[in-house]
Image: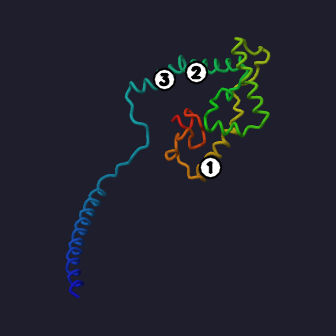
Amino acid sequence: FWLKTSWFLVVSPCTAFQRQTMSFHRAMAKYFAGRTMQTTPHIIKYSQPNENQLQAFRRQVLAPAWFSVFKGPMEKWEYMRSVATMRNYGIMADDATNCRNHIFERAMELLPEDIKTHRYRRAMRACEFSIRKTHLPIEEQNYDPMIPYMAPYVEEAKFQLQEEQELLGFHLWDRKLYTGGTSGFGERSMFHTLMSW
């Protein structure tokens, strides 16, 4: 009986004090809320920040002139040069991508045999042209090397890798990088794409 009574005596004054404190804070909150409601509300306008005359001149005059005189023609020249180089060697843009990328490696496994064979033969022909310092005949250069023939296989490889990571509970931050001559994926090369981040 004494313990229950003493506990009640100890707890009840604290609870009464908390009630007084809460009522004080409630009164202060009501005061400030009523005061702020009397003022005009601040309306946030979703617009671009105001720019001075120099910034407006740069955006309206200098940037379009820079793009039309230098940046646009330079990007077009780089694109046309890369297309011409690929046509000279008889390869596609997807043939020149890094095949050691983990997504691209999976996409290579998904390729049908005929596309694999065409890819391999184009690469060997390009190596031979490079060694002999020659190029594909002009009449055979009338194709578009920028057609992404591996795009559906790359997308399927992304979905497969994502599904495997979700099913296995795999996270990039808790994998074994390189222990005992083998990575967490069974790769034996230290400089593989998965381990060179």
Q: Secondary structure at mark 3?
A: helix
Q: Callout 2: few (<14), some (14-19), or many (20+) C-alpha neighbours within 10 Å? A: few
Up the image or down, 110 lies above or below 74; here it is below
User: Residue 151's image quarter?
Assistant: top right
Q: Secondary structure at mark 2?
A: helix
Amino acid residing under circle 2: Glu
Residue for badge 1 = 164
Q: CA distance from mark 1 to mark 3?
A: 46 Å
Q: Which mark is residue 75?
A: 2
Measured as percent of width and height from the top left, residue 57 is found at 43, 23
Residue for badge 3 = 63
Q: Residue at x 66, y 26 (%)?
A: 96
Looking at the image, residue 114 sits to the left or right of residue 176; the answer is right
Q: Residue at x 73, y 37 (%)?
A: 111
Q: Residue at x 67, y 18 (%)?
A: 85
Mark 1 or 3: the one toward you: 1
Amino acid residing under circle 3: Ala
